[in-house]
Amino acid sequence: MKIELSKKASEQMDLAANRAYPDECCGILLGKVDENAEKGYVEVLEAREATNQIQGRRKKSHFEMDPLFLYQVEREIEGSGLEVIGIFHSHPDCKAVFSEEDIKYMVPGLVYTVLSVTKEGVIETCSSYRKNR
Ligand SMILES: [Zn+2]
């Protein structure tokens, strides 16, 4: 499955990761998924930063999104041709590799992007998508 991140989506995620540093950022990915296309493709066109609801030190290594945020984004993109296709979050001072916990909560049919961020900025990103079927 080919996963393409648009420049806009990358910039929006970088901004969120830098702003939240040294805490984890989180948010929603918008775009298009076509599992039926030859080999299938995922196009991440935009990203929307959410508030990480975790409090205190755990926020440096965990995130939790307000479900109401998802609802607000869904209303915002209604009729725009965009769809909610996944979730992104950052790993401050840590590699862009999905943790065991990240993998445990992954849902097929959603795109996951993780960003490695240091005080110098975003170093690398990694994306994952498992087919629904
Ligand atoms: Zn993670």
Image (cartoon, rainbow, N blue to C red):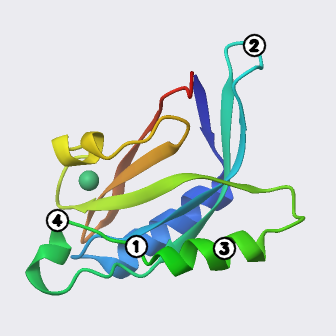
Residue 76 vs residue 27: left or right?
right
Question: CA gap, disc 2 to disc 3?
Answer: 30 Å
Among numbered discs 4 and 2, the one appearing first in the sequence:
2
Residue type at numbered disc 4: Ser
Q: Which residue is mark 4?
A: 61
Residue type at numbered disc 3: Val
Secondary structure of the residue carrying tag 2 is loop
**Frontmost residue, 53 versus 127:** 53
**Frontmost residue, 124 versus 126:** 126
Mark 4 or 1: the one toward you? 1
The location of residue 55, given as percent across then percent down, is 19, 86
Q: Badge 1: how crowded within 10 Å, few (<14), some, or many (20+)? A: some
Among numbered discs 3 and 4, the one appearing first in the sequence:
4
Q: Which mark is residue 73?
A: 3
Indicate the quadrant containing the C terminus: top left, top right, bottom left or bottom right. top right
Indicate the quadrant containing the N terminus: top left, top right, bottom left or bottom right. top right
Q: Which residue is mark 1?
A: 65
Secondary structure of the residue carrying tag 3 is helix
Secondary structure of the residue carrying tag 4 is loop
Q: Is residue 96 visible?
A: no
The location of residue 92, given as percent across then percent down, is 22, 64
Which residue ends up furthest to the top in the rendered image?
Answer: 38
Q: Check whether the beta carbons of the residues at disc 4 and disc 1 lie within 8 A of each other.
A: no
Q: Residue at x 37, y 60 (%)?
A: 89
Disc 3 CB within 8 Å of nearest ligand 1 atom = no
Q: Residue at x 13, y 86 (%)?
A: 56
Question: CA gap, disc 1 to disc 2?
Answer: 34 Å
Disc 4 CB within 8 Å of nearest ligand 1 atom = yes
The location of residue 130, given as percent across then percent down, is 48, 28
Q: Which residue is mark 2?
A: 38
Among numbered discs 1 and 3, the one appearing first in the sequence:
1
Residue type at numbered disc 1: Met
